[in-house]
Amino acid sequence: MSRGSRFSVVVPAHNAEATIGDAIRSVLAQTCDDFELIVVDDGSSDETASIVRGFAAADARIRLVSQTNKGPAAARNTAIELARGELVSMLDSDDLWLPRYLERMGEVLGHERSAAFSYTDAWVLEPDGVHIRAATAMSNQKPPSRPPSDPTRFLSLLLDHNFVYTSVTARREALVACAGYDERIWHGEDFELWARLLEARRAAVFAGEVLAIHRERPGSLTSDPGQLYEGICKVYRLILDEHELSGELRAVASSRATWWERQLELLDRPTDAERLRRLARRLKGRLLARRRRLRVLPAEVEQTLLACLPPRD
């Protein structure tokens, strides 16, 4: 494995045999090759480890680490402990990077020396593995076009809406200083970590372009609304109970916690009005499905899909 890599790419994987190879191919296709790739097999019962071993046998930059199933936060922490790079880049096992992801993240963090992490947005690949949505993964969170450079102002916006996509690149020293991901959290662990980094007065910077592809698929951790909402509520409760927030920030977090708890309640016990709203949303979604897809793919998106999603029988 490379000892002088600038980037340490971290990929937690649990029963990811269907997608882990594609994710690895997207890393190998980067315009910047100054990286090590650490895949943590988090207690898989399928062929995830075997697939990663095949890639590792062909490329010394790839390393497989296996552990019992402890969750994505623990898997990422395992990789961070082993990381040798100055910058640590997070990639989910079912997502893809566009070819310039590492190059662009390195440029941004090289310019913004005070920033603890840089973030991007992602195109959304539909479950058919062919169509890309016109709206990006974080567009419904209304991300600011010019995010504030002040960490406190940034945190206020983040607590109101988590607009930071999970595939960030962070300085390893910043991750170590704040003890990495909270392993008690299985949903929203990245959101809670970004909050702690910002609370430590470490800035965040937007890469300025969409550099990833989020694969929408049944069975992923975020595909179950009940688990997702419950996880978000847990994160807000933890932030309110354990984070040191000013009065203004606490008010923002408390308001959003109440809102998410209401959404969880409606999910479990929907009112008649809520049932009608859900039906209307489903019908509208079906009617507008084609309009919501990109008719012409950006060149880098098309290139990535062709290179990283080989034809399957």
Image: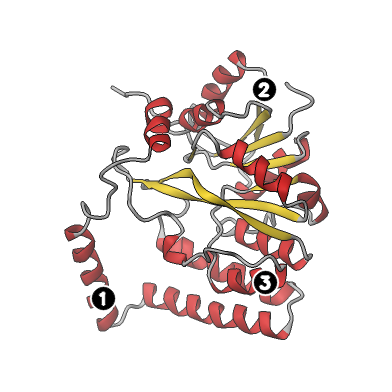
Dot placed on the residue nearer the N-terminal end, 3 or 1: 3
**Residue beneath the point at 72% across and 48% down:** 111
Q: Is residue 226 above or below residue 38?
A: below
Distance (Cα) linking label 3 and label 1: 31 Å
Q: Quadrant of residue 277?
A: bottom left
- The residue singled out by tag 3 in the image is 239
Distance (Cα) linking label 2 and label 3: 37 Å
- The residue singled out by tag 2 in the image is 61
Taking the image as shown, residue 302 lies to the left or right of residue 290, namely right
Give the numbered dot on residue 149. Answer: none
Query: Which quarter of the image is occupied by the C terminus?
Result: top left
Give the numbered dot on residue 277. Answer: 1
Residue 312: percent from left, percent from top: 32, 24
**Residue beneath the point at 48% across and 30% down:** 46
Distance (Cα) linking label 1 and label 2: 50 Å
User: What kind of element bears circle 3?
Assistant: helix
Amino acid type, label 1: Arg
